[in-house]
Image (cartoon, coloured by chain):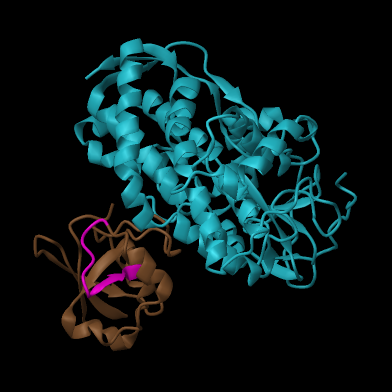
Chain colours: A cyan, B brown
């Protein structure tokens, strides 16, 4: 397995700054429990750092994360957006045709998924999502006490996304484990990754079958992807892999995003009260939660040439780890960065990435986040944490395993 | 610097001195003009930086690309013939005095 690759960076070239080496493992349980001191240490150490534990460069300031995201020819994705370098190792699954691709190949597949998940399509599904959100909140109000992760953050997306995709009724229990596997697999060969891959076979089998055209209901996102085969935009071999991208990245991420928003609103009652007074803030309250918690914490890129970044020189073929969560709380970019403020002008955060690979499903995520927070704001009076909050551990995703809450009607 | 004039739905007018080569969307965000949300940060994904370009200026802009055209079909307020996404309008000295009207809603 990785890292076959144990290079020590060369002494800085004339004019290039020395790169600080840090003894931080950003894929350890201790880091996941409280990443913020380490984020600050990395941001303060320099624009580029080197993490000896995994032999990778790291960027955690907003400016450098933004720069790497927006220079996809220098910082490529086709060698994998996890630690594993596809130029040196065999990927654990056939690479994604969109996430793990560079222009020009990426441009064509991206255009297809952009059309499938366009603003115009969101208008068509909006009422359905809103009705499901209201039904979910009514059901939770009747219960009063529940786990806001399993019963809300997971249950609501599960009540809308698989149907919007056009998935079969059977086998949906594989969706969250499959996504969890995908995001663990971006990490290093630690226990989280190894265990996820060892247990992956049934989930992979389900997803592979579910991506086939015959198994997708007409009118859903999946069938819409396959319809582009008929127009000649993609091949019949490519279509299932593009559907796979939606199944990989379309569910668990929104589970973590909604979980983040509910956790924020439960912890910061002043923000919850603002949202209740003005439910039209729901969409921004979700967006700010994506900045504040950054459900997708990290992605890697690989350098295609020697490059200078933030005054530091990085050689060709090096992995660069972008700390999206740290960039989203960089005080150089954000006022009161560690404050959850649902009225913040949050445009420009990198919780969905930036540039050509920016989350293609971000409009679905926002629609889910807005509808569920809007329904909560209109129907619920109080949200109180009522038990032990437990963290869920994943190499890429940040979120909770359990959030026991009690809610009261408005 | 190039002057861009934003007119709100209530006819309130804001003039900003925009940096050249930035987008009209970024000029609005940088100068605190409400009514431009730009959820996607200018990556042409979201259609929440929708503006109506004053008729007098419509012909002076670069034409709408296919991608922008598709996004404009999803704007929250009605799409009109002079609808544009402000992230796709680059500020240049030739646009000094550009007038854009903000829609009622962006999402």
On the image, which quarter does residue B23 sit in?
bottom left
Judging depth in this view, the residue of A106 and A333 nearest the camera is A106
Q: Is residue A387 left or right of residue A9?
A: left
Q: Quadrant of the N terminus of chain A?
A: top right
Q: How many marks?
A: 0
Q: Position of residue A319 (x, y in %)?
A: 75, 56
Which residues make up the magenta segment?
B76-87
Q: Indicate whether A301 appears above or below A316.
A: above
Q: Is residue A95 left or right of residue B9?
A: right
Q: Is residue A357 magenta?
A: no
Q: Is residue B3 left or right of residue A44?
A: left
Judging depth in this view, the residue of A137 and A125 nearest the camera is A125
Q: Position of residue B90 (x, y in %)?
A: 37, 78
Q: Indicate whether A183 appears above or below B29.
A: above
Which residue corresponds to the image point at 27% horizontal and 75% vertical from the top-left? Answer: B17
Which residue corresponds to the image point at 71% horizontal and 61% vertical from the top-left? Answer: A78
Q: Indicate whether A33 appears above or below B22.
A: above
Q: Is residue B51 left or right of residue A387?
A: left
Q: Quadrant of the C terminus of chain A?
A: top left
Q: Is residue B80 magenta?
A: yes
Task: Tell me if I can see residue A350 in this picture.
Answer: no
Which residue corresponds to the image point at 57% horizontal and 34% vertical from the top-left? Answer: A398
On the image, which quarter does residue A215 sit in?
top right
Which residue corresponds to the image point at 20% horizontal and 64% vertical from the top-left? Answer: B102
Extreme-front residue of the structure: A214
Task: Tell me if I can see residue A180 in this picture.
Answer: yes
């Amino acid at each position: 397995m990785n890292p076959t690759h144990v290079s020590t960076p060369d002494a800085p070239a004339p004019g290039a700054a020395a790169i600080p080496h840090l003894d931080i493992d950003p894929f350890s349980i201790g880091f996941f429990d409280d990443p913020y001191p380490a984020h600050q240490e990395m941001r303060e150490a320099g624009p580029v750092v080197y993490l000896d534990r995994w032999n990778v460069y790291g960027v955690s300031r907003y400016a450098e994360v933004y720069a790497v995201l927006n220079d996809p020819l220098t910082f490529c994705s086709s060698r994998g957006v996890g630690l594993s370098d596809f130029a040196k190792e065999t990927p654990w699954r056939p690479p994604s045709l969109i996430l793990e691709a560079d222009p020009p190949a990426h441009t064509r597949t991206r255009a297809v998924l952009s059309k499938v998940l366009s603003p115009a399509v969101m208008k068509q599904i909006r009422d359905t999502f809103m009705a499901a959100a209201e039904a979910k909140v009514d059901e939770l109000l009747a219960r009063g006490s529940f786990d806001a992760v399993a019963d809300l953050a997971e249950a609501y997306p599960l009540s809308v996304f698989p149907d919007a995709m056009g998935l079969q009724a059977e086998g949906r229990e594989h969706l969250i484990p499959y996504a969890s596997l995908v995001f663990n697999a971006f990490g290093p060969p630690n226990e989280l990754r190894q265990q996820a891959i060892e247990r992956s076979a049934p989930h992979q089998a389900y997803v592979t079958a579910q991506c086939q055209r015959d198994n997708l209901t007409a009118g859903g996102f999946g069938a819409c992807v396959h319809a582009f085969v008929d127009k000649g935009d993609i091949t019949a071999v490519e279509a299932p892999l593009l559907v796979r991208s939606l199944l990989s990245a379309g569910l668990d991420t929104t589970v973590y995003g909604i979980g983040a928003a509910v956790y924020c609103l439960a912890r910061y009652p002043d923000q919850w009260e603002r949202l209740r007074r003005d439910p039209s803030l729901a969409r921004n309250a979700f967006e700010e939660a994506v900045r504040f918690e950054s459900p997708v914490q990290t992605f890697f890129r690989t350098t295609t040439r020697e490059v200078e970044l933030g005054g530091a020189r990085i050689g060709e073929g090096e992995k660069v780890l972008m700390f999206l969560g740290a960039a989203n709380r960089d005080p150089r970019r954000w006022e009161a960065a560690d404050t959850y403020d649902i009225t913040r002008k949050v445009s420009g955060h990198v919780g969905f990435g930036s540039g050509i690979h920016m989350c293609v499903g971000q409009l679905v995520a926002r629609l889910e986040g807005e509808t569920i927070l809007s329904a909560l704001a209109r129907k619920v009076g109080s949200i109180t944490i009522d038990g032990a909050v437990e963290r869920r551990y994943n190499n890429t995703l940040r979120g909770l395993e359990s959030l026991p809450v009690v809610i009261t009607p408005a | 610097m190039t002057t861009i004039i934003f007119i709100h739905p209530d006819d309130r007018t804001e003039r900003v001195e925009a940096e050249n080569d930035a987008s009209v969307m970024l000029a609005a965000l940088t100068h605190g003009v409400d009514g431009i949300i730009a959820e996607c940060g200018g990556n042409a994904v979201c259609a929440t930086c929708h503006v109506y370009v004053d008729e007098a200026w419509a012909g002076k802009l670069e034409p709408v690309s296919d991608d922008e055209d598709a996004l404009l079909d999803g704007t929250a307020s009605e799409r009109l013939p002079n609808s544009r996404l402000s992230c796709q309008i680059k500020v240049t000295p030739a646009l000094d005095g550009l007038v854009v009207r903000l829609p009622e809603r962006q999402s």
